[in-house]
Image (cartoon, helix red, strand yellow):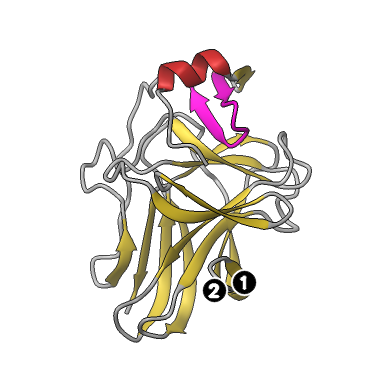
Amino acid sequence: MKNVICLALLVVAGLTVVAAGQGYTMADDGRHIIVASAPGVVVPAMRNEARLKTLFSNLSDYQYGTYFCCEEQDIDGPNGRYGVNWAAVPFTPNANVKLTRIEAGVSYLWGTGPVAIWLAADASGLPGDTLAGPDDVGNLPKAGSCCSLAVAKFNSVPLTKGTQYWIVVGTDSNSMDSSDGWNLNSTDMRAHPFALYRGSWTAEKNVLPAIGIFGK
């Protein structure tokens, strides 16, 4: 997958649509949503992981920029606007821990709205069997806003030190027509491995969407 292209070029090259009074552009890659304007109101993220171990996080501590408001990885159900699109981020714990919480910068575009978040095993470098979840998260902020987080909670799922796992943000039977966006992070502009699903999983490398993974 190509590295993230200049925002201005994406807006010119993509397909522009309007939803809920807000202009959105689908980039030529068919995967990134560009929001036409920055949010008028920024709501600081409500964080609640102070007593938990951070297993992985690219969320910013800056309250007005927990993630980037205006470019998103498309997340769709099979009946969503663009057809099924899921994304997954890999992580490897450096100790035996228990997963309890995922925070993701997901926002609402069209449809029913909920997003499904789950933990998957690794299968030769791609997401494999579901280990926990999915947890359906609704009441998402509208695309282009910042910085509310979609929070998925898990019942102390044991993870093994040195083993790669995947956090998947996608849809399930409760969100077949959902179209949402997983905002890119605002702390690390380097390309990292992740995976995309459009009927099958493929390995990609790009700027990651915004996520925090926590446990105890």
Chain part drawn in magenta: 23-37
Question: Could you say where residue 177 lies in the image, as x and y percent from the top left?
Answer: 74, 43
| Label 2 crowd (10 A; few <14 / some 14-19 / many >=20) | some
Q: Nearer the viewer, residue 52 or 199?
A: 199
Task: Assign a secondary structure to mark 1.
Answer: strand
In the rendered image, which quarter contains the C terminus?
bottom left
**Which residue in the rendered view is the most extreme toward the left?**
62
Residue 36 seen in this snapshot = no
- Residue annotated with mark 1: 128
| Label 1 crowd (10 A; few <14 / some 14-19 / many >=20) | some
Amino acid on which disc 1 is placed: Gly
Image vertical order of residue 153 relative to residue 12, above or below:
below
N-term-proximal mark, 2 vs 1: 2
Q: In which image quadrant can residue 174 be found? A: bottom right
Check if residue 32 falls in the magenta segment: yes
- Residue annotated with mark 2: 122
Task: Assign a secondary structure to mark 2.
Answer: strand
Q: Classify residue 77 as left or right of residue 108.
A: right
Q: Tell whether label 1 touches label 2 (CB within 8 Å).
A: yes
**Which residue in the rendered view is the most extreme toward the top?**
12
User: Disc 2 and disc 1: Cα gap in Å?
Assistant: 5 Å
Q: Nearer the viewer, residue 31 or 109?
A: 31
Question: Could you say where residue 79 lies in the image, as x and y percent from the top left?
Answer: 78, 42
Question: Could you say where residue 155 lies in the image, as x and y percent from the top left?
Answer: 48, 79
Q: Residue at x 42, y 80 (%)?
A: 163
Amino acid on which disc 2 is placed: Asp
Q: Residue at x 68, y 43 (%)?
A: 178
Q: Classify residue 50 as left or right of residue 136.
A: left
